[in-house]
Amino acid sequence: MVAQLLGLAFLFLPPSLVTFMTHGKSVYALPPQTAQISTNGEVVYQNTSVYGVVNKAVILACGPTLPDMYIWSFTKPGTEAIKAVVYDLGEGPKVQRLAETLGQLAVISNSAAVSLDNLQLDAQGLFTCQAFYDIKGEPKAYYYYVRLIVQVPISKPTLLMSNLSPVEGSTLSITCILENGTGPIQYMWQQITSNGTITTFAQGNKNMLNVTNVRRNHTGFYQCVATNPVNSETSNQSWLNIIFGPDTPQIDVTPYTMTERGYSALERDTVSLLCQAQSNPASQYVWFYNNSQVSAGPQFTIIKILRMHTGDYACLAHNTYLDTRAKKTISLTVYYPPDGSPSCSMEAARNYTALSLHCSWPGGFPSPSLQWTGYLNFVGKDHVDAGQHANPQINTTILQQSEGLVSNNSLFTCIGSHLALKQSTTCSTHTYIPPTEPECLAYETNNKQYLILSCAWEGGVPKALVWWEGPGDQGKSGEESSSILILHYGTAHSGKPYTCHAKHSLLAKSKTCNVTLEVPVLLSQRRVVSVYEGSDVQLTCNLRANRLPVKNITWFNNQGEDIRETSKYMLLRTSDWANLTVRDTEESKDSGEYRCSTSNAVGEAELNVTLIVKRHPMPPNVTLIKVMYNSLQRNEVELEWQVHNDKGGGWTGFFLEHTWISERPGRRGRSNDSKMEIEERIGPPVWYTTNIQDPDARIHTIGKLTPTANYKFRITPVNHRTIGYPSEAKTPAEPRNNMYPAVVGAAIGGMLFAAIITVLLLVYIVRNRNNNPRLHDMLFGSQHSQSRENINFPEDEVVGGAEGGTEEIVGSPTTGSSIALPRAASALTTSPLSATPTASQSPAPGDDNEPVSVTITVKATGS
């Protein structure tokens, strides 16, 4: 249908293909480059080759632009059939079933190119794309021939060896086996060394490698690498183990020492013989000493080798796999050097005008060699005298003239060598003048019997000569480095020097130092010390510098007693000073003269220190100028005071005290009771103290008070150890504009007025009881003569009788339970003559003229 429309029916005829075989593979010849076309038509042929990989993706192009129509066809190698794969005749691409055998085919949008994913091996062949352009105008036809070559990746190769454990010198074949892979294929054999380095052993296009005359260095891991144009794969590693040996053993001696006869060792050292022979598998070792077997194993150790162990030692190596043997023999000689190292010394000679050098290193086999070097090379042989010893290699003595030839810090070295030692050993000595000056000291023995003068000049080489010269032929002959002069206690000359002389071989003149013995001198920072009572004070006593040692510095108190460490006294002392601390001083006990004393072999010394302990001044007087409640609740009092005769301090604070007067419950006081009578009943008042530590304070407020209690306040100044006089006690006043007294007065007046009215009414009812018997009986009852007040305490009867008064219930002011109630005497109260009412005492019934006595007592207090 399309051909009829285009008038190009011949275009759908398949072109002829020429197919031939080359090396077993199909190769396609291009179709002839001719075609029948219309007058205006045109046919174009193009040929390309594309390489693809199995299971991968490949794109086949069909021209640079999208044609109006196209047809993709496939020709399998070895055939001439052209089969459609996909086409688009203007209505969209149509994929044929053949595409499923080639891979996952997809048409790329906006083009005629196709994509083959998961490429199959059957897709190898010739793809033809027939593309038609401008079919409505001047149609054009294009033939695109795409030769697709599908390549197969190489699979993981397998390395196969003809023998994994060949004997050295034999032949070995190695094969690299592949299952898949498109040629051409290259093979490479690699060896992995023990340190991980990979080296190429051989390579070529054949998968088999023949190795003749294998050597021990071929031992190791091997792998083969196969490579084609697609990929490269490496086989697993295989271990090649070459069997060989044993070679001639190698014997290592530790410690390693070579002599002309072989090896040598030091006596008493641990000698280890290690035998090693190249062998695979490892050899077994046997040790022989003078042809007698002594040990088995690669290492033979002799602990604390002796000279009797000198001889021949042989090691036999045996490869049990190949049953081959090898043997090596060495000679071991035991030497022992002298103990330690050479000893060098230097002495003064010729009355400290020459030097004598000594070098000694006895013992050892063979005998060591000793030789002096150093400053002697610059002196000259005329000034060197060889030692007179029979064996100069053991002990060498050199006598060296010192005048003008040897200077300070001249070094002399003795070199000792021995066959058993790899290196020579040395000892050195050098001349030097002592770096310090001679030092003179004087000290006493513990039993005070002797005075010892010591003189030392240490550090020089050779040692210096030291001797004493003193007044009165008190001297001592010379000794090296130090000298001691012993004098009996008390025989030393005061103020006269004792001289120590020191002579060194390198100095033309001697050096001296002096000791002058003197009586000790004591000093103090303060001879008079003044403190206030209660303080701790320290008295000092120092010893002026004196070469002559003294006894311990002793302190005596103001009573002349030797002071020991107690709670009162503390002593801190050294050889040069002693400090006395007097704790918590008191004027009467601690004031006075204190004395420190010491002595030495020449005399005694004392020092007096005066301690003045002063009492703290009395604090000034204080007066309370204001004591007032600061609120209507009466639970806080504000106090203000004034200090008299203030002379700039002298006190540390104040004691603010308060109290109140309380009687036992049930007691009623009388207004005329004296203070003494009240204290006899309830005891003296208890004052409660508040400490005020600020001496500049003048105002203080006390809270949490009981409103109904009567308080008194006073204030006392205090010093560090002195308490002043307390101020006059004062009762707090009510605050200004206080309505409390008015309210209380109004309440009491109302109560009195109501009481009077009630009493008059009762008197009227009593007098007219016959006229109004019901009212009388309702108020007083029919047995009014037996109605009496129940008095629990006899004292209440006496105190609260007809006289009236104030009833006081005593309690703790802090709880507010103490109250005062006014009480008036009336005919209803109990008679003061008896606490228990009786019938005889009751008034006769019907007595209208019974007298009534009414007494009203009002007691009001206020400030």
Image (tube, rainbow, N blue to C red):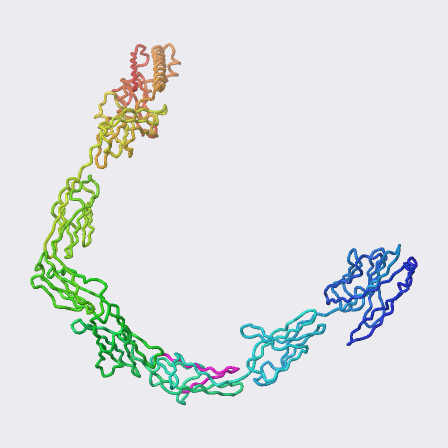
Answer with left or right where residue 68 lies relative to residue 269.
right
Q: Nearer the viewer, residue 685 or 21?
A: 21
Picture coordinates of residue 486, whole percent (x, y): 11, 64
Q: Would you identify the image quadrant in which residue 801 lies?
A: top left
Please give the range of residues in magenta: 269-288
Is residue 176 placed above or below 470 in the rendered structure?
A: below
Answer with left or right where residue 687 lies relative to residue 349.
right
Q: Nearer the viewer, residue 64 or 740?
A: 64
Q: Would you identify the image quadrant in which residue 518 lies?
A: bottom left
Q: Nearer the viewer, residue 827 or 514?
A: 514
Is residue 105 placed above or below 843 in the rendered structure?
A: below
Q: Nearer the viewer, residue 514 or 289?
A: 514
Q: Which quadrant would the N terminus be assigned to in this image?
A: bottom right
Picture coordinates of residue 169, whole percent (x, y): 57, 85
Picture coordinates of residue 651, whole percent (x, y): 24, 33
Q: Which quadrant would the C terminus be assigned to in this image?
A: top left
Residue 277 sits inside the magenta stretch: yes
Q: Point out the residue furthest to the bottom here.
A: 291
